Amino acid sequence: MSKGLQAIGMHKRFGGVHALDDAAISVEPGRVTGLIGRNGSGKTTLFNCITGFIVPDSGSVTVDGRDITGAGPQTIVKAGLSRTFQTPREDARSTVRDAVLCGCYVQSSASFLGALTGLPGARREERRIGLRADALLERFGLAAQAEAPVGTLSMGLVRLVEVARAIASGARYLLLDEPAAGLSAAEQDILSAQIRALASSGVGVLLVEHNFSLVLSMCDRITVLEFGKVLSEGAPEQVARDPGVIEAYLGAIERGDTGSTQ
Amino acid sequence: MKQLRNHANSAAALLIAVLFALLLRDPVWIDVAVVIGIQALIALSVGLSFGQAGLLSLAQAPFAAIGAYATGIISVHYGGSPLAGLAGAIMLPALLGYLLARLVIRLEPLAVALATLSLAAIVEVVIRSWDSVTGGYVGLSGISPLAWAASPREYFWLVLLVIVIVIALYENLLASRFGRALNTLRHDRARAMADGVPVVAVSSAAFGLSAAFAGVAGWLYAHYVSYVGPGDLGTHLSISVVLMAVIGGASYVLGPVVGAIVLGVLMRMLPAQELQGLFYGGTLILILLVARDGLLGIAEPWFARALRAIVPQPARVAPEDERRT
Ligand SMILES: Nc1ncnc2c1ncn2[C@@H]1O[C@H](COP(=O)(O)OP(=O)(O)OP(=O)(O)O)[C@@H](O)[C@H]1O
Ligand SMILES: [Mg+2]
């Protein structure tokens, strides 16, 4: 049984667009793996296929040796995989604490009828995940904003809320889709410190990010996608020297062709 | 302390209920209050399904009708006790609501609303044509009254008690992982899926529960009037209770109750029946234009300020409860 998250031979077509064309990725526990590639290269599609939001045409996904190909998001979250979205989908009116509590859903075993009737077991579960959420707020430096509506936060804090909400499920693997997009340099520093800390605690992180220097500084491994194919894979220095990458991707950065859309 | 926070709404409802019960003496108004109370209960079921889970249902009155017929049939045909009837009035709508939701929840919101409308039509046809069981066009009469709530005044107490219990259960649910999941999936299903929420199962359970709330209202109706007929709890009422919930504030626990009281009382004061439709339509448009969150949405900031003035320090205790919990 191999440790880690592996996706291999991933194919996905949308009509005529071959969004994934034999894409593959591997994430090890305790490591940050970067996933880069131009706009439309298939990064988000790969995320969606791994996390059960869309079913790949073919390919296989395993977590710590367990096959989760084609499973629904609910099964995959329970298997220890959590994701964030490229565009935050937080409810602006929800409080920060409630948002993190929402992420604790699979950590509670309260039954519907138990919750409805307020049985002691359900209340105990609620107290337990309440403490869990409070600990996460503390850890992510969000304790002061606990009761603030998410809509009142800066983008930097919203991204932290999303990461806290994702890890609240008890995930062993985190898939972060451009978490640093639109953040100031100071906000990026805070976020990357948190992501590195998560990795040090044993979480395997898959990070999509357009800012190449940020990727180089944060990641242990990098995979480059191009037209749904793996263009290059390896240690950051190695990938940065890859002529194909320089041609296809870094060249594009110089042309200013990396702004994130969607 | 936490329990008190979670039950601020039922505590408020209890207080208002006791006040009402003590002050209301006029028999005509007691009768009106029983009817409004039953409608408030169905409106609360709209609060749960629409206000929390975002599922617009036009079958809440038929669910109440199923509850009323369930207890009526058990009482009239089998001589069963009202408590046996209550079990039927809860379980039958819950099961039907749950199954319907399982089938249609994946569809677009509009399609879900249309599916509930179709269910309403089917329920009505079954009630009208299944003569031997439902009494067909004639209806069911001779449903046993409740021995322990014989006078209208006692019945009024019973209705209030049921409302307070339903609100307390509703609050329990909202303060749990399921309540948060419902609010998330109303806002954005993908967000809820990423939390690991089984979206179809949780929405269906909530919809079944909402149908059960309506079923209990039907039970109260059947034993109050001692009769239930095919025209009693129909689509007209389904629409009224949606309006009550929206006007009071569907996402607030007490919104539907406030809406039911305000509309119910105003309705009694209107001179002519024909004006009702105009009045309903006008009020709805007005509310949608000036206050999308209903009357409680208007009252909330004011209420929060008043509360801060009274209790200066732990300012966040109650206002947050009025919001959406
Ligand atoms: N649901 C969909 N239906 C049709 N086409 C899609 C869909 N999702 C993605 N695509 C297409 O698949 C290709 C890959 O898109 P994807 O979103 O995975 O790229 P990306 O690498 O995440 O890009 P970005 O950097 O802009 O986020 C694009 O050509 C896109 O238009
Ligand atoms: Mg993308």
Image (spheres, helix red, strand yellow):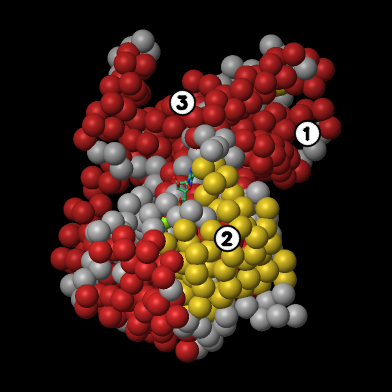
Residue that mark 2 sits on: A23
Assess whether mark 2 and mark 1 are in contact (beta carbons under 8 angstroms). Answer: no
Q: Amino acid at mark 2?
A: Ala
Which residue is found at the position 67% from the left and 37% from the top? B103
Q: Nearer the viewer, mark 3 or mark 2?
A: 2
Q: Which residue is mark 3?
A: B239
Secondary element at image label 3: helix
Front residue of this view, candidates B15 and B323: B323
Q: Could you give the CA–CA distance between mark 3 and mark 1, rounded to whole angstroms?
A: 28 Å
- Indicate the position of residue B65 as horizontal and vertical percent values: 63, 28
Split into 4 quadrants, where in the image is the C terminus of chain B?
bottom left
Left or right of A60? Residue B109 is left
Q: What is the x, y in percent for residue A154? A: 23, 66
Q: Residue furthest front?
A: A243
Which of A78 and A259 lies nearest the eye of the viewer? A259
Please name the amino acid that badge 3 sits on.
Answer: Ile
Q: Are marks 3 and 2 in contact (CB under 8 Å)?
A: no
Against B83, residue B237 (above or below) is above
Q: Which residue is tagged 1? A: B74
- The chain that hosts pointer 1 is B
- Regarding mark 2 in the picture, which secondary structure is present there? strand
> Hey, what amino acid is under mark 1?
Ile
Which chain's residue wears label 2? A
Mark 3 vs 1: CB contact within 8 A = no
Q: Residue at x 28, y 80 (%)?
A: A189
- Of helix, strand and loop, which one carries label 1? helix
Task: Identify the chain of the residue marked 3, using the numbered disc in the image.
Answer: B
Estimate the x, y position of residue B58 in percent, counting from the top left: 52, 28
Between A181 and B44, the one nearer to me in the picture: A181
Is residue B310 placed above or below B17 in the rendered structure?
below
Q: Is mark 2 within 8 Å of ligand 1?
A: no
Q: Crowdedness of circle 2 by 10 Å Cα count: few (<14), some, many (20+)?
A: many
